[in-house]
Image: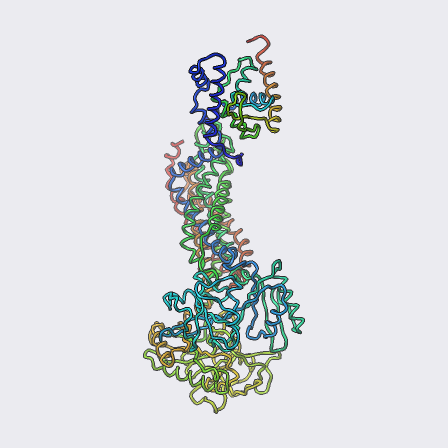
Amino acid sequence: MWPFPRRTDDDFHAEIEAHLAIETERLIAEGLSTEDAARAAARRFGNRTSAQERFYESRRILWLDELRQDVRYAWRALRRSPAFASVAVLTLALGIGANTAIFSVVNAVLLRPLPYRDPGSLILIETSPLNRAPEWLTSAWRQQAKTLSDFAGSSGPNSQTLVVRGEPGPVRSALITWNFLSVLGVTPAAGRDFTAADATPGAVPVAILSHDLWTSRFNRDESIVGRAVTVGGQAITVVGITPASFRFPVVPPVTAVSVPLDMQPGVMRVAAPTTEVNVIGRLAPGVTAAAAARELLTIFRQRGATVTLLGESELEFSQSDVNRFALETGPLQDRLAGTVRQRLWLATGAVAFVLLVACANVANLLLARASTRDRELAVRTALGARRGRLVRLLLTESVLLALIGSAGGLAIAFSTSGLARMLLAERVPHVATIALDWWVLAFTIGVAVVTGVLCGLASIPGATRIRLTGMFTGGTPAVTGRSTTRRVLLSTEVAVTFALVVGAALLVQTFWNLSMKDRGFEADRLLTVRVAPVAPREIQRGAQSSLYYAGFFGDVRDRLQRIPGVASAGAVSLAPLGGTASRLANIAVDGEDGPAEESSTPIGFVTPGYLRTMRIPVIAGRDFDDGDRLGAERVVIVNEAFQRRFAPDRTIVGARILSITDVFTVVGVTQDVPDRSLREAPEPLVMAPLAQMAAGHITWAALTFVLRTVESDPLRLAPAVRREIWAIDPNIVVAEMATMEERVALTVRSERDSALLFGMFAVAALVMAAIGVYGVASYTLAQRTQEIGIRVALGAGGAEVSRLVMMQSLWPTAIGIAIGIAVAVVATRLVGAMVYGVTPLDPATFAGSAFLLVSVAVAATWLPARRATRTDPLLTLRSQ
Amino acid sequence: MSTRKEQERVALLQGTLDLLILRTLVFGAQHGQGIARAIEQQSEDTLLVDHGSLYPALQRLEERGWIDAEWGVSENNRKARFYELTKKGRKQLVAETDNWRRMAAAIGRILGPDEA
């Protein structure tokens, strides 16, 4: 009926005028005077306004009118019971708000297109370890690949020092290929993009500044474009500024300066141990990411590489034993979402559960309310309301509730979207802000309508099957099926809550276990900072380099130790929980080969005082001292894992370690310290004095300094540390200033976030379940007042009566927990990979969660049960 | 519910008028005044068409897709809105006529041969 072109009132009016004119003419023809004819025609027509009104009425749609009626009626009904309405709206707001908040993150990470030109055709090719990806492979892609229309690469972030008007400050830089921005379809906000000429050898070094850096360090001064800035001791000309909205797709968000990657080598020294290059490819029209991966594979095979397929999008290449690396590829958006995707789906599942609990709860409330409205519904039925119309009225009410709830939900989601992003997608670089856009709004309204209909439907049994006779002869409402529905709803609620509580308990334990784990050193009162010197280029890799670095870092250490408030200081090339290092290949201890499989052992270089500052116990032998210098015997200290692996049944102190290039004598053994994450057992590790470092080991140019401070807040020394180091040279890189506690917290960050998120969901579900249990108990009491009155009159004691009321909701709770155990057994499989120090089916966790739910249920039934014991038999019996 | 009963009563009247309008249009396109006149003449002035109700009824039929309308010029050279039966309307007319005949016969049987 809708798609008719609307007829205007004017058109209708004109038609009536035409009618009157024709009628008047006819009457004139019959012999009336003009005046009389016009009057007669008008009389004959009757009330013109009424006709016009009826025309207007006819254009309206009947169901819309009825809907308006229903909505008005529902609104009035809700206003008449504000307590019910506010509890229901609040419950729904929580449930819907949680879903909206999580969806806003899902939308931003997985659904909303990336903010680049034609983002669907961008793929990401990641190789690791990336510094080993041989040059010939990348050039092979460029020459041969037909599935890709364009390539661009980026690398970083690298910590650098930017000197502006003599003031040094830390920045993070990215190296990008000259075409990087144009492949993404991004145009600089000011100045120009890089060109191919910028990337030719001998060109003037150029950089593009991020909008953030331009704002924070240059006050948005446009005249900076064309001028040179000093980064890492080198003058680099600024040619452009990125748009304010631009975020690097792969590199984390704080990136500030970008320099053409193709200008390698040596334009910008890198303060990280590896230079990882991520390649972004643009697919040729009509080509899928999978087809591109297949083509890359073929190209590599043609070039004689051995290719092993590790997974659908993951390949391992080896050209020789040394040149071995893995490659992963896939659509850019998928790859960026990475591991966040799994957590997002898990959170989505959890909030769906929360909404289910909210829904069951509101359905229960609606049912309870329906029992007080039986009379009203009966009257409506008696007056001829059809069943369908009653159902519609009830549904209108629950949908209205859900829509009001969704407004609250949007408010909740809006105020928590930052939290949701922090907990779920902090590491997804392109998700800078999570907007509540039209999709999120549509999702929220959709969820609200579905929720409203579901709640409403669940509350209908009985409501429309009223036996009128019972109703009007007085007495208890003659409604069947309702209490069963209530108990089923309650059991569902409890089962889902139980599963959520178990999940949250597992994740909280995981976080707790990791946080409490012995780290092998004392993390409090430790300040850490990464320092890299500005070495003249000829020294960087030369024979003199080890002497230069040892001298430089020794100088820094002396200065830092003199700062008041510093108890001791040391430095290490491989910080605990810090990641990659240089490695010794295939070592042998005392002439005996290690375990048969090919091995490489990480080697870290330390200054004297490092182990003492960290308070890493030396359990055998000695610590390094100033006597361990160049020319003296080359010594190392190993960790317990090393001893277990290479010399399980003898003392290792005094043993000699041989690698392809070096011979060392072991002088000490330290306790194990976790090297990458607290989850993994530490690898065997060799530590050598920095002073004895051979030039071949310098694959890095930065050390991490650790300072044990006297004061409890180590960060208060940060300005003094920067001042002291920049006093040597303002171009020295001073980066990643943080307390050791912060670094440790960072490694358990995702565990903390998951525990927090699921904990909140579980608490929300618990509160709702408690309301549900309370509701059923109160309802039972209201329904059976008469019976209880009789029982009391016949001599039933208080305990008996309260048991009667409590059992009505404790039974469904027990059944709910039984079902919940089954649900949890299946659901905890999803978190299986995330838990640590506890098994997903941990009996104690299950038992504890069950106990918690039973306690909550008992507490929730306590009030109604007490009210029941105070039943006055006379009053209840008389009321009949 | 009082509103419903009102609607039903109105519906009955409208139904009759609707049928007569459709029937009149079988002979070709006609404007509102012409339709009213035709009904009156054919019923030998027994039926009096309420002109005020006629136009909302026409509007309703048009919305249901039983008739089409177009502005045109009357025999006296006056602008008027002309209505025409659609295919759907023709079908509706057959069904409605059938219904009406059966109902009239049934009512006739109940009332008996002699009254009136």
Residue A596 x %, y %? 62, 79
Residue found 46% across the figure and 62% down from its top: A246
- The quarter of the rendered structure image containing the C terminus of chain A is top left
Query: From the viewer's perspective, is A808 left or right of B22?
Result: left
In which image quadrant can residue A77 be found? top left
Q: Nearer the viewer, residue A155 or A26?
A: A26
Query: From the viewer's perspective, is A52 left or right of B39?
Result: left
Q: Which color scheme is applied?
A: rainbow
Residue A113 x %, y %? 52, 56
A2 up-or-down from B105: above or below: below
Residue A794 seen anywhere in this rendered image of the structure: no
- As drawn, the residue found furthest toward the front would be B77
Residue A779 seen anywhere in this rendered image of the structure: yes
Q: Nearer the viewer, residue A286 or A92?
A: A286
- As drawn, the residue found furthest toward the top would be B114
How many numbered discs, if any? 0
Q: Nearer the viewer, residue A493 or A760?
A: A760
Residue found 43% across the figure and 46% down from its top: A405
- As drawn, the residue found furthest toward the left would be A564
B7 up-or-down from A273: above or below: above
In which image quadrant can residue B100 be found? top right
A443 up-or-down from B66: above or below: below
Residue A828 x %, y %? 53, 58
- The quarter of the rendered structure image containing the N terminus of chain A is top right
Residue A91 x %, y %? 43, 47
